[in-house]
Image: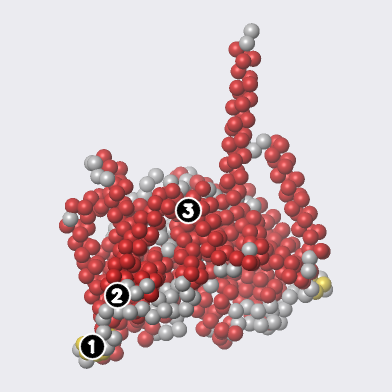
Amino acid sequence: MIGGAQSRIAAAAGLAAVATLIVAPLFLRRYGLYLVSDWAVMTIAAMGLNLTLGYAGQVSLAQGAFVGVGAYSAAILTTHGWPFAAAMALALAVSFAVGWALGYPALRVRHHYLAFVTLAFSTLAFLVFRNEAWLTGGVEGIDGVPRPSLFGWSMRPPLAYAYFCLAALAFVAAAMAWLIRSPWGRSFLALRENPLRAQSLGVDTRRYTLLAFAIGSALGGAAGALYAPLVGLVEPPAFTLALSLNLLMMVIVGGSGYFLGPFLGALIAVMAPEWLRAWENYYLILYAVLVMGLLVVSPTGILGLIDRYALHRAAAEASAARAALKPSIEGP
Amino acid sequence: MANFVALLIAGLSTGALYALVAVGFTLMWQTSQTINFAQGEFVMLPAFFMLAAMNRGAPYWLALAVGVALSLAILGLAFKRLLVDPMLRHGVLPLAIATMALSSFLKESVKTFYSAEASPFPSPAPSSDLKVLGVAVSWQSLAGLIAALLAVTFLQLGLSRTRIGRQMQAAAQNPTVAQILGLPVERLILYAFLLNAALVALASALVSPIYLAKFSNGETLGQAAFIAAIVGGFNQVRGAVVGGLLLGVVENLGAAYISDAYRDAIPLFVLVVVILFRPNGLVGRAEERTV
């Protein structure tokens, strides 16, 4: 258990982080604002994957493809004059439905089959984006995706759009926090910890796993709907398997199964290439080695490592306290 | 009709290569529950060991031997000792994810340290064509087909007829009992990894003359091999062969008669149809769950 002092430190750190996110964009220039928006979008997609991977224990290799589905849905609707809200709704609905349709056959069998079905789906999605030029603009993609306006306020300036993405992230985070505390979320956890026991306690494991995957995919779609107006140009190479793997690594590095894991993982994935720019290609090699090393040491990522350290210290303190207490009990 | 025969032969030779890669994948799953997402990159890499040896003046056969040796040491021994052994205690999932990181490590390393371009790769088979049933078939793909089928047949015989092969099967089916009966389970698992390393090195030498050696070769090949393994039955060497051949043929026929643009998506459809109607694969058997 985490002690009172530690939870106070955690709360203070959380408040400081939120305050930084609110104030910092005011001092950033165009590229900095792009990075903040990108981080918010990637965090949303990674949170969806964390629901699938961290809570339901399923590997999805198609989260990047769902970001693509969302981005194309939003780009197609908004360039045809529909409002952003409709585009977001379509992105959510389409990626939820596709997730359900993919997960249904895969989860009927054995759980690691989902990894292979989603791997193959990520190829199919790329081919559809590239080949169906009448819908997706083919290789050239869709250019000039407009940014939405909110109550008459245009989200066109980078600062406004960064706040828009951060607000969306806050909303998704609140919804996710509610979801994992709800009976639904507890069922997700039960099925990660012990699927057979969950099943024998009456949790319909297949249904809940499928639901976790479909909701996770829908969040990927939502991230895509935010991504399209951010970059303005939606084209197939952005949504290959590389993006899916990148999102997976974010969840793993941050700490899968931890609420804050995706925030941390996305921060590292978005900022590390900026910090290590001088390393060029070596950076990707180094990143892969670090991920493997981290997995060997702690399969639950950086937050898992911190958690374990905190547990270890708490245990050490408790035994020190016991040791200090002992003489007084045995004393005169 | 002639066209159909040509497609069938092309499909079989692609399929035999898929089978070769899928067999090693299945072996590692059976013996140690390792799902190797870097299997495609394992096929991509040995060609570069061989090319590096040739660049230093080694003749073809020596380069081949060097490639197999390095692949045994790196993709067999080092992979097992450095990644699989320390990860296994964490369960199936973290190891599977670690192999994804490994796949991007191998790909980026080849791209950075060798070349981002496709390199031509020599083949001992003549580059001319052979007439079979009035159809022209290239010697190279025929050689690939024959070599892959021979390798798989020998492997199947070795696993079912020799003492070590039967011991490996025992260790895969029930490690605890195998251990109690005095089998060196750890060493038998290592043999499976070494076999896989040899198979991917062979596959690499067969594939690279046809597709050229390139850092990204593993992507489609690995995916096809996973799907071949599942389609056939994840827990059967025979299954991987059936799955590989079927996938190769369906892919070639589908690309010709249905849609070439969606060629790479054909495995997905085969996969979904199979797991909907034959969840344990075409020749697989149900695996008991452990509580």
Task: Judge whether residue A201 can be spotted in this image.
Answer: yes
Mark nearest the camera among 3 and 2 is: 2
Does residue B111 appear left or right of residue B156 in this picture?
right
Alpha carbon distance from label 3 to label 2 = 39 Å
Report which quarter residue A96 is drawn in. Answer: bottom right
Residue pointed to by mark 1: B130
Q: Position of residue B137 (x, y in %)?
A: 26, 86
Figure check: A19 above or below A80: above
Classify mark 1: helix, strand or loop: strand
Q: Position of residue B194 (x, y in %)?
A: 31, 58
Classify mark 3: helix, strand or loop: helix
Does residue B238 appear left or right of residue A324 in this picture?
left
Chain of the residue displaying label 1: B
Residue pointed to by mark 2: B60
Task: Judge whether residue B9 can be spotted in this image.
Answer: no
Chain of the residue displaying label 2: B
Q: Residue at x 59, y 85 (%)?
A: A140
Mark nearest the camera among 1 and 2 is: 2
Chain of the residue displaying label 3: B
Report which quarter residue B221 is drawn in. Answer: bottom left
Q: Residue at x 37, y 47 (%)?
A: B290
Residue pointed to by mark 3: B94
Residue type beneath disc 1:
Leu
Q: Position of residue A2 (x, y in %)?
A: 64, 38
Does residue A30 appear left or right of residue B267 in this picture?
right
Classify mark 2: helix, strand or loop: helix
